Amino acid sequence: MVNIITYGTFDLIHNGHINLLRRAKEYGDHLTVALSSDTFNKIKDKDSYYKYEIRKMILESIRYVDNVIQEDNWEQKIQDIIDHNIDIFIMGDDWEGKFDYLNEYCKVIYLPRTVGISSTQIKSDFSKANDG
């Protein structure tokens, strides 16, 4: 069995998220998603529309996702890889090179982002629509 992990906030789920999860799952048998907690998002200066519990419920309903764990800090990745017997760590290519140090523990792959979509863009579009 090949175990995969990816990390993120996964707020306002969109086709880019689904593409990432689908492509990540294609690399193995079991996909774990480490979902940023509300507290960790505050540390990262990120505002989520949905609270952690709702984001977790949404992720758990996506067929590509086998397990959702909580991400509370930047430093937990090595322990997550060990605890969940991870073979492959996958992130979007906007993080290219940032997690290469994890190659000591598992294979690291950066997948291309879906062009033209992001949660930040969605929030910006809604904000502009409501300002007018």
Image (spheres, rainbow, N blue to C red):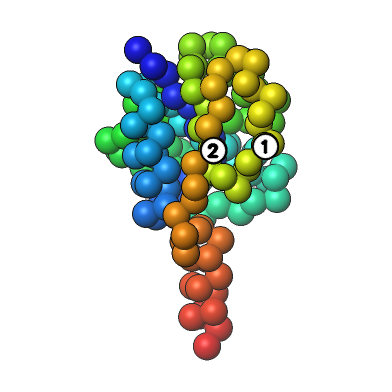
Identify the image quadrant of the N terminus.
Answer: top left
Q: Which mark is residue 26?
A: none
Classify residue 79 as left or right of residue 70.
Answer: right
Q: Residue at x 59, y 41 (%)?
A: 38
Q: Residue at x 66, y 29 (%)?
A: 100
Q: Is residue 57 above or below residue 14?
A: above
At label 1, the amino acid type is Gly
> N-terminal of the two: label 2 or label 1?
1
Tell me whether the residue at label 2 lies in contact with that at label 1, contact meaning CB atoms closer than 8 angstroms. Answer: yes
Q: Quadrant of residue 3?
A: top left
- Residue indicated by mark 2: 110
- Residue indicated by mark 1: 97
> Would residue 50 be visible to someone looking at this image?
no
Q: Residue at x 70, y 45 (%)?
A: 44
Query: Circle 1: is it few (<14), some (14-19), or many (20+) Cα within 10 Å?
Result: few
Q: Is residue 114 above or below residue 5?
A: below
Q: Residue at x 49, y 41 (%)?
A: 111
